[in-house]
């Protein structure tokens, strides 16, 4: 069914959502894909516009995106399938390749995309002789923007919602033929990421960055903290194989703790901002001009 009715009874809102944006013959273009693409566009645009502040060029970001965009989607899909593989088995118990490839129906786990994206970023940074932590500091802005937009793709698919609640902003949906009112966890995560993005943008605009990798650690800590709590409200969590442990919640809290410890340890060493890649590159350019 491509139509869904979503209500916000506490706010007096009723929305009729069509998952399909438009069709060309029998080919359907889904809002989920459009919103994900829009998130990519926002992220790439911001990173290109601010590349110079990190000692990079817009071309460096465009080259990176050529690999990160498809790689991130593949990683997000693989992560989801690995920890939710029973959904993708056919009648004979074998993996259904067609179902695995049907990403327009949803089923992307952001952590899978982040993990593969980081690995690809390392490879590109190494090839371009750009410090890996410096490139990560710029890329997290794109990640934040992609996630802020991407959660609205979940909204259009009526997925990534939470457990029942009576809070004023509760969301009413049809699930398994039954009307329920739940936490709009897609909204919680989108807003949490928006706040995180604004905080990092505030630091960037004021030139507050002590070492390469600082923004990346702040991103991991911020996102992990919020995702850990929000994941605990969701009803569609991926579990760590046969355990009762929510995979993304465990990963979120562990990564948050590690990032915080690394951030505190690094700041206690009083790093010299002159060692930032952008400042070292500027010094090199000034010396070349003088000679």
Image: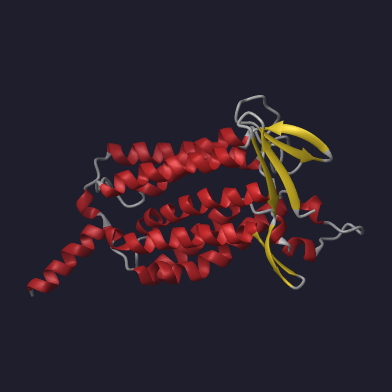
In this rendering, the count of numbered labels is: 0
Q: Nearer the viewer, residue 224 or 144?
A: 144
Which residue extends farthest right?
92
Name the residue: 57% across, 36% down: 228
Which residue extends farthest bottom?
291
Can residue 223 be seen from the camera position used here? no
- On the image, which quarter does residue 51 sit in? bottom left
Can residue 266 be seen from the camera position used here? yes
Instruction: Tell me if 197 is positioned left or right of 169 in this view.
Output: left
Which residue extends farthest left?
290
Instruction: Tell me if 111 is positioned left or right of 3 in this view.
Output: left
Residue 269 image point, x, y percent: 27, 40
Tell me the quadrant of the picture where the C terminus can be found.
bottom left
Above or below residue 145? Residue 221 is: above
Instruction: Tell me if 214 is positioned left or right of 269 in this view.
Output: right
Residue 196 image point, x, y percent: 43, 42
Above or below residue 72? Residue 144 is: above
Residue 147 image point, x, y percent: 52, 50
Q: Nearer the viewer, residue 107 or 166?
A: 166
Above or below residue 27? Residue 143 is: above
Name the residue: 43% across, 70% down: 62
Residue 192 image point, x, y percent: 49, 39
Name the residue: 57% across, 58% down: 36
Colour option used: secondary structure
């Amino acid at each position: 069914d491509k139509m869904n009715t979503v209500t916000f009874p506490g706010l007096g809102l009723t929305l009729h959502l069509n998952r399909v944006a438009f069709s060309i013959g029998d080919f359907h273009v889904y809002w989920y894909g459009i919103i994900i693409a829009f998130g990519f566009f926002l992220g790439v645009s911001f990173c290109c516009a601010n590349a110079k502040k990190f000692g990079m060029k817009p071309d460096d970001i465009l080259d990176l995106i050529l690999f990160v965009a498809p790689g991130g989607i593949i990683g997000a899909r693989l992560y989801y399938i690995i920890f939710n593989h029973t959904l993708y088995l056919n009648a004979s118990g074998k993996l259904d390749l067609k179902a695995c490839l049907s990403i327009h129906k949803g089923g992307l786990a952001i952590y899978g995309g982040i993990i593969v994206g980081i690995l690809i970023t390392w490879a590109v940074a190494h090839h371009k002789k750009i410090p890996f932590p410096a490139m990560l500091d710029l890329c997290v802005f794109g990640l934040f923007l992609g996630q802020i937009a991407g959660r609205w793709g979940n909204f259009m698919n009526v997925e990534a919602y939470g457990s029942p609640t009576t809070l004023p902003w509760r969301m009413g949906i049809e699930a398994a033929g039954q009307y329920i009112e739940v936490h709009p966890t897609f909204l919680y995560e989108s807003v949490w990421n928006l706040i995180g993005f604004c905080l990092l943008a505030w630091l960037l605009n004021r030139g507050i960055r002590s070492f390469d990798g600082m923004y990346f650690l702040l991103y991991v800590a911020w996102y992990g903290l919020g995702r850990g709590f929000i994941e605990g409200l969701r009803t569609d969590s991926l579990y760590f194989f046969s355990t009762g442990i929510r995979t993304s919640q465990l990963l979120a809290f562990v990564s948050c703790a590690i990032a915080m410890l690394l951030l505190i340890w690094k700041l206690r060493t009083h790093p010299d901002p002159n060692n930032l890649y952008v400042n070292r590159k500027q010094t090199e350019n000034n010396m070349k001009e003088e000679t």
